[in-house]
Every structure is written in structure tokens, then in C-alpha cells.
């Protein structure tokens, strides 16, 4: 059996394409995130209906950024941050397909690639390793499937991989960050307070929650 597996990456319209190299299940984390911010990102892009699952989860594959390569449409890659200290959330501006989430600095070698950008079936990503922030799911924690690792074990698994990726220098081999400065190659736009509040109201309505002023 081959010890490498490359995943094709493609936005909805096909203008942005690439490859996630060496994405064997043992080297990645296939998971779902139900946090408010991931939900807000999908709503901001107008992609909630096809990115979020029935409970508001975003399917994500966590991997080293050194494994991600863009072969077409790099000029169409854009980024936002929901707050000045939030994650950098990358997307294809041509069709608003979410690409993935990274830390604000390339010094932390991590990217959570959103499955909407992976042109491969979920089965290719291996088992579900965890389901984070389930308390923010539509229907609450009890509505979320119980597969995957407990939260603490999932965090430990991620930290071990981060350390390994850092030690081998993956933070200097990212297609989204400058190797010398660690700054994003595309300046993320930080949403305004009004934009964030509007997104929170939209997410609350989508989850069927009451929200003041909504």
C-alpha cells in the first residue's frame, strides 16, 4: 500500500485548484467544528446551505500547511478575519468557496482545510477524529453524533502534530504566508463590528434561536 495520498483541491467554479499532498489519515485530523465563528464564516460567504451540516458543523481536515499547494488561481485567494485577533479565514473570491483556516502568523504551521474545497469523498479523509465546540451546534450538544475522540484527546493529538510540523520547518513552507516574515501573502480584511453583529443574528436565526435586535 502506498504511504502517500494526494487530495485534489478545487473551488466550486474550478478557478482555484491545488493539491493536499501526503494526506494519509494518520497524518491529518478529519473533524467537524461547530463553533460560532465557523458558522459565521459560512454565512458571510453565502455558503451556509452547502458548507454547514444539519447541525451547523463545518467539515475540516487539519494538516500541515507545507502539504498544501496551489496550482491555479492563486490570484483569486482572499482572506478575512472576523475580529482583529481571530483566525485568518481563506476563501476563493471567484465563487466564495471556503478554503481553510489558519493562525494569524505563519509561525504556527497549521491549516484546517474546509471539505468544500476538497474534491474527494469524505471517506478518503479517514475516520472522524473529533467534533469541536458541539455546544454551539444547531440543536445543542446532544444533537451532534458521538463519534470521534473526546475534546481533550483531540487537542492533544493536534498539539503533537503541531510540534512535529514546527520541528521539521513546515512553518517556512506555506503557500499562504511569507517564509521570512510569517505574514499572510494576502492581507485579511477584518470585519466591522456591524458586520459581525449581523452575522451573529443570521447564525442565531439559522439555529432557530431568539436574539435581541434580530
Image: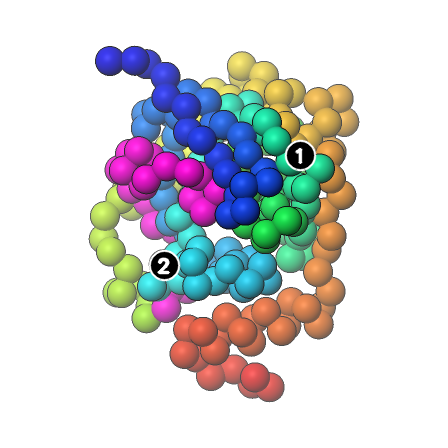
Q: Percent position (x, y) of residue 70?
A: 59, 29
Q: Secondary structure at mark 2?
A: loop
* Residue positioned 32% across, 40% down in the render: 121
Mark 1 or mark 2, whichever is nearer to me = 1
The range drawn in magenta is: 114-138
* Residue positioned 47% across, 83% down in the render: 210
Q: Earlier in the sequence, mark 1 or mark 2?
A: 2
Depth order, front residue of 205/69: 69
Q: Residues within 10 Å of mark 1 (few under 14, many from 20)?
A: some
Q: Percent position (x, y) of residue 209?
A: 43, 79
In the picture provided, is 25 more to the left or to the right than 164? left
Depth order, front residue of 65/35: 65
| Residue 185 falls within the magenta-colored stretch | no
Question: Which residue lies most toward the bottom here?
Answer: 213
Gap in angstroms between the C-alphas marked 1 and 2: 28 Å
Per the image, the residue denoted by label 2 is: 53
Depth order, front residue of 110/68: 68
* Residue positioned 66% across, 41% down in the render: 77
Q: Secondary structure at mark 1?
A: helix
Q: Percent position (x, y) of residue 199?
A: 59, 69
Per the image, the residue denoted by label 1 is: 74
Q: Can residue 160 be seen?
A: no
Amino acid at each position: 500500500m502506498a504511504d502517500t495520498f494526494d487530495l485534489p483541491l478545487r473551488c466550486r467554479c474550478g478557478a482555484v485548484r491545488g493539491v493536499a499532498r501526503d494526506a494519509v489519515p494518520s497524518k491529518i485530523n478529519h473533524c467537524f467544528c461547530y463553533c460560532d465563528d465557523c458558522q459565521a464564516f459560512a454565512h458571510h460567504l453565502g455558503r451556509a446551505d452547502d458548507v454547514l451540516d444539519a447541525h451547523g458543523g463545518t467539515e475540516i481536515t487539519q494538516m500541515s500547511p507545507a502539504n498544501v499547494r496551489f496550482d491555479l488561481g492563486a490570484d483569486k485567494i482572499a482572506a478575512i478575519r472576523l475580529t482583529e485577533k481571530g483566525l485568518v479565514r481563506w476563501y476563493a473570491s471567484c465563487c466564495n468557496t471556503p478554503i481553510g483556516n489558519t493562525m494569524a502568523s505563519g509561525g504556527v504551521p497549521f491549516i484546517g482545510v474546509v471539505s468544500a474545497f476538497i474534491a474527494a469523498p469524505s471517506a478518503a479523509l479517514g475516520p472522524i477524529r473529533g467534533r469541536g465546540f458541539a455546544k454551539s451546534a444547531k440543536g445543542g450538544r446532544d444533537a451532534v453524533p458521538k463519534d470521534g475522540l473526546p475534546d481533550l484527546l483531540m487537542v492533544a493529538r493536534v498539539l503533537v502534530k503541531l510540534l512535529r510540523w514546527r520541528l521539521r520547518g513546515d512553518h517556512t513552507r506555506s503557500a499562504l504566508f511569507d517564509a521570512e516574515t510569517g505574514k499572510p501573502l494576502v492581507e485579511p480584511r477584518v470585519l466591522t463590528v456591524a458586520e459581525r453583529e449581523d452575522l451573529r443574528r443570521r447564525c442565531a436565526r439559522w439555529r432557530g434561536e431568539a436574539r435581541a435586535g434580530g
